[in-house]
Image: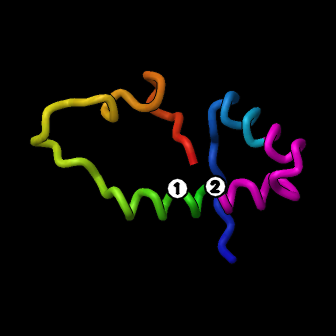
Amino acid sequence: MPKVEITVPEHLEMQIAQLVEQGEFINREEAIEDLLSTGLKAYKTSGPQDQDEEPGFEDDGMMGHDDEYVF
């Protein structure tokens, strides 16, 4: 399996660590792999937004932050 190195904001790292501590995932690697896979499936379902549409809530990201998504 290919290895990928990423840098994530600290608040996302804290959320991932919390999910692991709560037993949702065995470890960080499993959590990141599963969350990334789920996010890609959701992206394929909804697809990119057409740039000609009027801006809406999604343009601001979740809670006004571009890097927060719910999986």
Q: Which residues are magenta?
A: 17-34
Amino acid on which disc 1 is placed: Gly
Q: Is residue 38 above or below residue 54?
A: below
For residue 22, what is the image quadrant? top right
Number of numbered markers: 2
Observer-nearest residue: 28 or 70? 70
For residue 45, what is the image quadrant? bottom left
Observer-nearest residue: 44 or 2? 44
On screen, residue 59 versus residue 52, left or right, reads right
Residue at label 1?
Answer: 39
Residue at label 2?
Answer: 35
Observer-nearest residue: 29 or 3? 29
**Marks 1 & 2, CB-CB < 8 Å contact:** yes
Given the current orientation, which residue lies at the most extreme left position? 52
Name the residue located 58 percent from the left edge and 63 percent from the top edge.
37
Say whether residue 26 is magenta: yes
For residue 15, what is the image quadrant? top right
Say whether residue 2 is magenta: no
Q: Which mark is residue 51?
A: none
On screen, residue 38 versus residue 62, left or right, reads right
Residue 18, x across and y down, in percent: 82, 37
Name the residue located 49 percent from the left edge and 61 percent from the top edge.
40
Amino acid on which disc 2 is placed: Leu
Residue 35, x across and y down, in percent: 63, 55
Residue 7, x across and y down, in percent: 63, 42
Distance between the alpha carbons at the discs numbered 1 and 2 = 6 Å
